[in-house]
Image (cartoon, grey):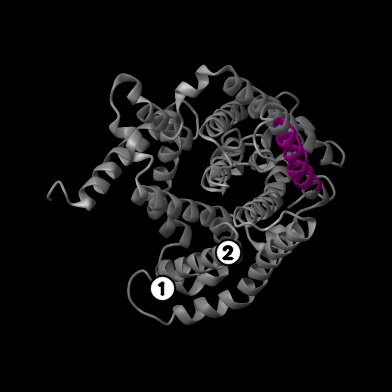
Amino acid sequence: MPATDPVAAVVLALTVILAGAKLGGHLAARLGQPAVLGELVVGIALGNLDLFGITWFRGLAGNPTIGVLAQVGVVILLFQVGLESTVRDMLRVGLPSLLVAVLGVVTPFALGWGVGAWMLPHESVYAHAFLGATLTATSVGITARVLADIGKSQTPEARVILGAAVIDDVLGLVILAVIGGVILGVDRGQPLSLAETGLVLGKAAVFLFGALGLGVVLSPHLFALASRLRGPGVLLATALVVCFSFSYAAAAIGLAAIVGAYAAGLVLEDVHFREFEQRGERHLKDLIEPIASFLVPVFFVLMGLKVDLRSFARPEVLGLAAVLIVAAIAGKQACALGAVGGGLDRMSIGIGMIPRGEVGLIFASIGTTLTVGGQAVVSPAVFSAVVVMVVVTTLVTPPALAWSLSRRGTSQLAPPGAAA
């Protein structure tokens, strides 16, 4: 393959990214941490080799083809997250889960906005709002894994956490959609007003709940029709058609594509795939996994590549990271006040909602692509501080949750109103 072939540069970059991601993921898993953390750290290490005169890896962060692959990986990741729940799950959460979810979005958002206004007075109000949106995220996958590892996934606290995460994801995506839509409008010269903000909020709500309603009605018929087709890969292709169609529709009306991807995952249920499985095909989650294993690590390594360790030589960046960590932990502890009902361990519920993981990174990465007047809403220094917050909240949750749940022998009986 000639050196001038543009494909050669891309496949070489993918070789380095995937090899590094899998090595980092392995080391993280050996240390009892999520693989995503290892992928992120590898990206940070590679991106900062320019401190030693090796600049090639830093250039990968600006490669447009790698950037597109990473964004497709994010779409697949949010589709996977959606597949872990259903619209029925969302409607079935009990009162404790609902209150925890609402407080788990409102409180961190307010704290994040306040941190931005305090620590970044010269940044725009949109940067402050986006910091708040980043803190609303919760990576329930990390918490779910910890709960399973310590044998506590059937406790009332676990049910409240996992139930709250479904609503938390939806509310967080709505906030992201609204803030992103407002920023896009302002960048195009549209004046910021309550009416415009309300219009974007209405658009996000109508799309999300409209897509869920339409998807629930139409997806069974679509998969029934697709099941008549013969040939390999029909189930996977049909699911991706739904995912990409929803993602495009969200982007077309000014929302983030991941909003559509998440909605697509929510509307697809196991019953839709029954006819495929009866003829020997694997479950959709198993079919999606190889694609995710290829594309999702590209995103996390790329996020690490964008972190410039030299920015931490500035005390204000370290200070911002430290205050964000405090706000991130305090905001999710406050949400535990919504855990009404006898016998619930509120501390464990709050700790279970702490990790930002991949969701926080996705939110922050979108902020780096949005501009107002030609200036990125989330600057490289702010992004680096957010990455530190994501890493720390991801690291502290597993040991803290294991300690909290074991310290008092939580009850196995679900209280009234807890999500089943």
Q: Position of residue 32 (x, y in %)?
A: 49, 28
105 in magenta: yes
Residue 114 visible from this viewpoint: yes
Q: Is residue 286 above or below residue 275?
A: above
State the mark number for residue 181. Answer: none
| Label 1, label 2: how far apart the Cα atoms are | 34 Å
Q: What amino acid type should be assigned to the residue bearing mark 1?
A: Arg
Taking 294 as reference, is 80 left or right? right
389 vs 242, left or right, is right
| 360 sits to left or right of 42 | right
For label 2, the residue is: 250
Residue 274 vs 181, above or below: the answer is below
Give the labeled residue for mark 1: 279
Query: Of residues 222 and 55, which is closer to you in this image?
Result: 55
Disc 1: CA contacts within 10 A as few (<14), some (14-19) or many (>=20): few
User: x and y percent of residue 8 in the render?
Assistant: 20, 48
Residue in view at x 67 percent, y 54 percent: 182
Disc 1 and disc 2 in contact, CB within 8 angstroms: no
**Quadrant in the picture for residue 177:** bottom right
Tell me the SS state at disc 2.
helix
Query: What are the residue bounds of the magenta stretch?
Result: 99-115
